[in-house]
Amino acid sequence: MSDTHVEIATIASNLRAVRARIDDSCRAVGRNSADITLIAVGKFHPAASCRAAIAAGQSDFGENRVQEAAVKWPALRSEFPEIRLHLIGPLQTNKVKEAVSLFDVIQSIDRPKLAVAVAEQMAKQGRRPACLIQVNTGEEDQKAGIAPAEADGFIAQCRDGLGLPILGLMCIPPADEPPSLHFALLREIARRNQLSALSMGMSADYEDAIRFGATHVRVGTAIFGARPAPA
């Protein structure tokens, strides 16, 4: 069997395993696994790996960088128009035009200047990708996201002031703290703002995130294996 066929089989097997664990996690807390969107994170993985996941039935993919997605995805999406592409990494204002045209979901709205730029580009392009607000639940200086104390006002500004299609919230918990504390905080902010989507949980903690109400889980390594070095 060629290396290509081995990779395809491995990715398909990994996807089955992740989906089974999602099913088990949902069953344990009385949730329906159909309500969980699995996002396969393709950061630094080649188009061939994403193609293998598509062949195994995966339809939602996440990318951290606009420039990487712009190279990898246009050809794949012309071939597989059902694919939904999520931007899950920080978005610079100079990349907003490209992001609005390329992505179906932007999960990293995190500051007023960016929100205004996204709203302006949506109006210019006549395209309205769904949006999530990223909350920096650990208030880490090196990490993107609106501070929890500022989240309510920012949500109102984005949703009511700018008319952005805000579906919910996203977070990336600190690596050295129990993620459940941050999942619970994000869930509470969403509850009081009547937002239904919660993007939280990655390869190491998505089962815990489901227990706390995640509707979207972002899984890369558990599907594609170790992330290759950037080109």
Image (spheres, rainbow, N blue to C red):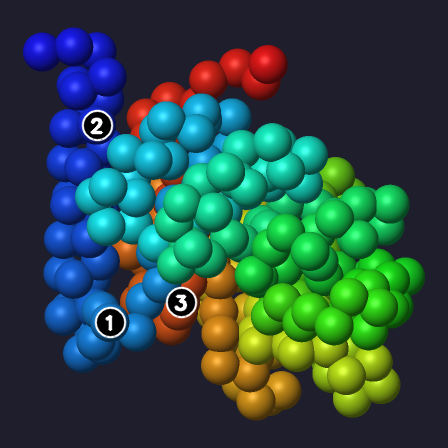
Compare marks 1 and 3 and give the one earlier in the sequence: 1
Give percent across and percent down for residue 173.
Answer: 54, 50
Give percent across and percent down for residue 160.
Answer: 78, 88
The quadrant in which the C terminus is found is: top right
Compare marks 2 and 3 and give the one earlier in the sequence: 2
Looking at numbered disc 3 in the image, what kind of residue is underneath it? Answer: Ala
Looking at numbered disc 1 in the image, what kind of residue is underneath it? Answer: Ala
Residue placed most toward the observer, 119 or 73: 73
Q: Which residue is mark 2?
A: 8
Task: Identify which residue is drawn at 63% across, 45% down.
Answer: 89
Dot 2: element: helix
Looking at numbered disc 2 in the image, what kind of residue is underneath it? Answer: Ile
Q: Categorize mark 2 by other alpha carbons within 10 Å: few (<14), some (14-19), many (20+).
A: many
Q: Is residue 222 visible from the viewing direction of this image?
A: no
The answer to whether residue 57 is above or below residue 129 is: above
Q: Which residue is mark 1?
A: 34
Distance of label 2 from label 3 (alpha carbons): 28 Å
Residue 214 tag number: 3
Side of 118 where 73 appears, left or right = left
Name the mark nearer the viewer: 1 or 2: 2
